[in-house]
Amino acid sequence: MPSEPRMFTAQVVRTQRVSPSFQRVTIASGDLCGFDWRGLDHWFRLFFPVRPGGELRLPEVKGRQWWQSYLDIPEADRPHCSNYTVAEYRCAGEVAELDIDVVLHWHEGELSGVARWAVHAEPDSPAGLLDQGVLFDPPSDAEEFVLVSDESGLPAVRGILRDLPSHAVGTAIIEVPAADDVHPVTAPTGMRIQWVARGASDPVGHRALSVLRDCAGKHPGAYAFVVGESRLATQGRRTLHQAGVPKSRITFSGFWRA
Ligand SMILES: Cc1cc2nc3c(=O)[nH]c(=O)nc-3n(C[C@H](O)[C@H](O)[C@H](O)COP(=O)(O)OP(=O)(O)OC[C@H]3O[C@@H](n4cnc5c(N)ncnc54)[C@H](O)[C@@H]3O)c2cc1C
């Protein structure tokens, strides 16, 4: 994480459905040209006005402090804030574009939270991004990798696969809600990609954990990265540790809670 994380502002350029469970929102600005994109699972805090057409009021950032300033914004004007991964970043000339792949989730039949913004965001509507850096942190001797995620961690795992050294070996287990969410990814030839589509009655992460239990013992020297629904993250870490992977070689993070 940067010691002096920067806030960037940008505007929505377009939004498109890329698969049954993902909406890709592209934002752009001149300011984003200064974003120091490190690839991998580089993530950020995303801010946008709660009311469509509303003004974007952003918290003040001093060093790593911003939360109190965020809470100090009167509730009616306080922007929505959630964590997202840079799916892709392109800087051309004086404008940079950044893609965000947002998982669509529903509550009582209605699109909920960021998913609603992602689908309905109007071109030119404002967004803020607070740079948070990269979670993926392998030890220098790591050549074998185990990556595990649900759909919320797919942009992170896809970014890691894209940016791993070409000699990397290991396994990536990616659970998605629907078979049509599966798509080609760029990865070193030594990385085995195991997509798992969730069954209608499966709890999130259940199938990914089952695949992980079958293969965890084959990678005791690996560095592991396990993210997604919080139970997948904690159970995944436990499974790997019980199979011989030291805790110091596992990065795990609950990205959301079912
Ligand atoms: C480092 C990091 C990177 C992340 N990157 C991405 C990313 O690139 N793309 C992405 O889509 N998510 C990503 N997430 C997860 C995202 O931050 C959460 O899903 C977040 O809760 C979404 O905010 P919300 O306002 O939509 O829902 P919230 O207001 O947090 O929750 C509202 C309701 O929605 C449910 N909910 C939240 N997320 C999901 C989900 N994914 N599936 C089903 N139900 C859900 C909650 O259980 C709750 O009931 C990332 C999280 C972290 C920590």
Image (tube, rainbow, N blue to C red):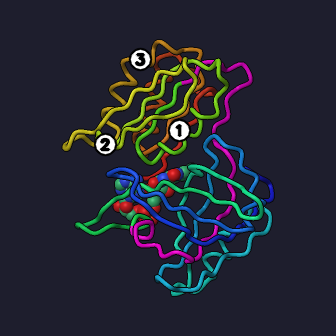
Q: Residue shown at 28%/39% (left/top)?
A: 198
| Mark 3 or mark 2: whose residue is earlier in sequence | 2
Spatial CA distance of label 2 from label 1 is 16 Å
Residue type for callout 1: Arg
- For label 3, the crowd category at 10 Å Cα-Cα, with few meaning under 14, some 14 to 19 and many 20 or more, is some
Q: Which residues are magenta?
A: 116-145
- Where residue 219 sits in the image (x, y, percent)? 52, 15
Q: Residue shown at 58%/23% (left/top)?
A: 188
Which residue position is annotated with label 3? Answer: 215
Q: Is mark 3 within 8 Å of ligand 1?
A: no
Asked if residue 180 is positioned above or below residue 186 in the image, the reply reads below
Horizontal relation, residue 68 to residue 106: left or right: right
Q: Is 111 in the magenta?
A: no
Q: Marks 1 and 3: CB-CB under 8 Å?
A: no
Q: Is residue 258 visible?
A: no
Which residue position is annotated with label 2? Answer: 180
Q: Marks 2 and 1: CB-CB under 8 Å?
A: no
Asked if residue 150 is positioned above or below residue 32 in the image, the reply reads above
